[in-house]
Image (cartoon, rainbow, N blue to C red):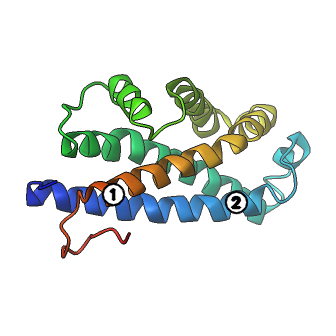
Amino acid sequence: MILDPAVSLRLAFLIRVVGRESDHLALTDQRLFAVPFDVARAECLSADPDLAEWVEAFVSRFARLQGTLEDKLIPVLLAALGARPGAAIDNLDRAERLGFLQSVDQWMAMRQLRNQMVHEYVEDPMILAGALQSVHPFVPSLLSAVGAIRDEVARRGCLLADGPGAVSR
């Protein structure tokens, strides 16, 4: 597929970004959930700066990766594939039909949990623990979406073969 060079560069950039973001999320997920995250651990955040940093990193990395996929990469990829990007829910539906996402419903559940983690965790350790316990099983789905998109981009040759952001096959 031949793309406008600007679209190709943007797509290559976003592929690199989500690659790094997914690597960082996977690492933080392993560290944070090596021991189950429960209310007792959430209540210890103020006394355990390392744990607090892991929680902050996990929440931030999960939210950033999901946001980058939803708001940036999926619309650019759809445009590169010849579809007209639309509202976020429509883009997610197309991404599901193309096999990039397992389920739009699952994606929306992740978004709701992400919002709980980002906006409410400072106030209530029980909400934080519940949100983290609920979102942790979704991490593989999020990482799988990144992999599916990267594979599709490489398969279709959407990137300039010799460009600075070419995806290795």
Q: Tell me where residue 128 appears, x and y as whole percent.
A: 74, 38
Q: What residue type is labelled 2?
A: Trp
**Residue farthest along the left direction in this orientation:** 4
Taking the image as shown, residue 61 lies to the left or right of residue 80, namely right
Element carrying mark 1: helix
Q: Is residue 132 above or below residue 94?
A: below
Q: Between residue 34 and residue 102, name the one nearer to us.
A: 102
The circle on residue 54 is 2
- Quarter of the image for the N terminus: give it: bottom left
Taking the image as shown, residue 3 lies to the left or right of residue 81, namely left
Q: Residue at x 56, y 52 (%)?
A: 143
Q: Which amino acid does label 1 sit on?
A: Arg
> Residue 32's image quarter?
bottom right
- Quarter of the image for the C terminus: give it: bottom left
Residue behind mark 1: 155
Q: Is residue 104 above or below residue 135?
A: above
Q: Between residue 17 and residue 145, name the one nearer to us.
A: 145
Dot 2 crowding, Cα within 10 Å, few <14, some 14–19, many 20+: some
Q: Which residue is drawn at 71% across and 34% down?
A: 123
Q: Which residue is drawn at 19% across and 62% down?
A: 9
